[in-house]
Image (tube, grey):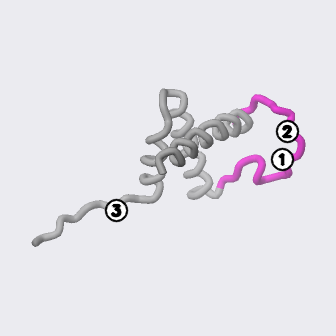
């Protein structure tokens, strides 16, 4: 029997598929896409988040991009984790 070549499934594709099982709606999907972009920039460009570059210290709760991303990420990651735990 002849084997058919199939392209490899990259880890980030598997991670994207996993996350997309648990996110709903446009806002969460946009956040998931943003997280994949941030992950890619860290992994491939060597970029760091602000908290990685210096002591995050006392967070005044500003509304800058990274603070908002951090808040949204926390909510979304909890939802993904609870969804995964309820399945297993």
Decide which of tag 3 and tag 1 comes sooner along the chain. 3
Is residue 5 rendered magenta in the image?
Answer: no
* Residue matched to label 1: 56
Q: In this picture, is 53 found above or below 69?
A: below
Pick out the residue farthest to the right. 58
Q: Residue at x 85, y 38 (%)?
A: 59
* Residue matched to label 3: 8
Decide which of tag 3 and tag 2 comes sooner along the chain. 3
Residue 40: percent from left, percent from top: 55, 52
Residue 80: percent from left, percent from top: 55, 42
Could you tell me how far apart the alpha carbons at marks 2 and 1 are, in whole angstroms?
7 Å
- Please identify the quarter of the rendering in which residue 62 is found: top right
- Left or right: residue 45 versus residue 53 is left
Disc 1 packing (10 Å; few <14; some 14–19; many ≥20): few
* Residue matched to label 2: 59
Which region of the structure is painted magenta? 47-65
Label 3 close to label 1 by CB (< 8 Å): no
């Amino acid at each position: 029997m002849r084997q058919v070549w199939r392209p490899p499934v990259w880890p980030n594709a598997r991670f994207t598929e996993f996350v997309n099982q648990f996110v709903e709606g446009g806002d969460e999907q946009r956040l998931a896409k943003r997280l994949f972009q941030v992950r890619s920039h860290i992994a491939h460009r060597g970029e760091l988040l602000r908290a990685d570059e210096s002591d995050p210290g006392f967070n005044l709760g500003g509304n800058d991009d990274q603070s908002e991303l951090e808040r949204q990420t926390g909510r979304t990651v909890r939802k993904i984790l609870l969804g995964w735990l309820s399945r297993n």
